[in-house]
Structures are given as structure tokens and as C-alpha cells.
Image (cartoon, rainbow, N blue to C red):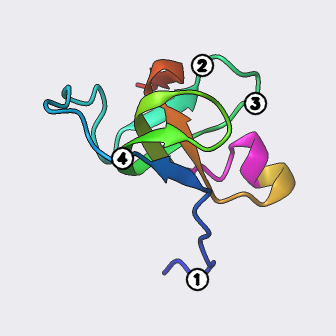
Amino acid sequence: MFSEKISVPEVSLLPTLPAQLPLPKFQLDQTLKFGKVPSGDFGRVVGYVFAASATVQATGYHYLLLLDLESDSRKELGILCDWLFEDDALLMM
């Protein structure tokens, strides 16, 4: 049983959604890694939103990752989850 408290990082929801949303590239339970940053972070998709990032100008799908136990940020900093922008995501097989 998972007993750690999960705090979800901030993401900014859009005031209105586009008339037609594109299909997301990734689905729940897939394992993704950060492709454009050297963080070494990866994890399972546990949610996603069509939003604007709180830290960078990136509007589109953002995937909430439950970071893997071997993910650098989880091992070194205790971060349990993080948002990953679709254009930065790589699918792990």
C-alpha cells in the first residue's frame, strides 16, 4: 500500500478550451521520461490535462508522472510526481 502523501505541482488551466482538442499522444499507465532536460526523471502517467505550464510558455497536454523509485528527483530530492509537457516526453519501452 502506498503511504506517502502526494503533492501535485502547479499547472495553469486555460480560461477556455479550444473548440477541438487534439488527441493526446500518450495514455494513462505508460512510462515516459523527460527528453529535453538532463534530469534523469521518468515515471508512469497517472493523469493529464490540456493546460498552460506554470513555469514555461507551453500550452497543450501535460502529463502527471508518478516518478519511478529510480528516478533521480525521487531518489535524491524525494519528489514523488511532476508534470511533463507532451513535446518534451519520450515513451519508454
Residue 20 placement: quadrant: top left
Visible in this render: residue 15?
Answer: yes
Give the magenta-colored segment's residue range: 66-74
Element type at mark 2: loop
Classify residue 39 as left or right of residue 88: right
Q: Earlier in the sequence, mark 4 or mark 3?
A: 3
Residue 61 placement: quadrant: top left
Q: Are marks 4 and 2 in contact (CB under 8 Å)?
A: no
At a point 65% along the width and 60% down the height, the residue shown is 80
Label 1 sits on what residue type?
Ser
In the rendered image, which residue does mark 3 sit on? 39
Label 3 sits on what residue type?
Ser
At a point 20% along the width and 25% down the height, the residue shown is 22
Q: Earlier in the sequence, mark 4 or mark 2?
A: 2
Visible in this render: residue 66?
Answer: no
Does the segment drawn in magenta span residue 27? no
Closer mark to the observer between disc 4 and disc 1: 4
Q: Residue furthest front?
A: 15
- The crowd level at tag 4 (other Cα within 10 Å; few <14, some 14-19, many 20+) is some
Tell me the tag on residue 3.
Answer: 1
In the rendered image, which residue does mark 4 sit on? 49
Q: Earlier in the sequence, mark 2 or mark 1?
A: 1
> Where does residue 84 sit, x and y in percent of width and height?
53, 36
> Gap in Å between the C-alphas at discs 2 and 1?
29 Å
> Gap in Å between the C-alphas at discs 4 and 2?
19 Å
Closer mark to the observer between disc 3 and disc 1: 3
> Where does residue 87 sit, x and y in percent of width and height?
47, 19
Q: Residue furthest right?
A: 76
Residue 79 placement: quadrant: bottom right
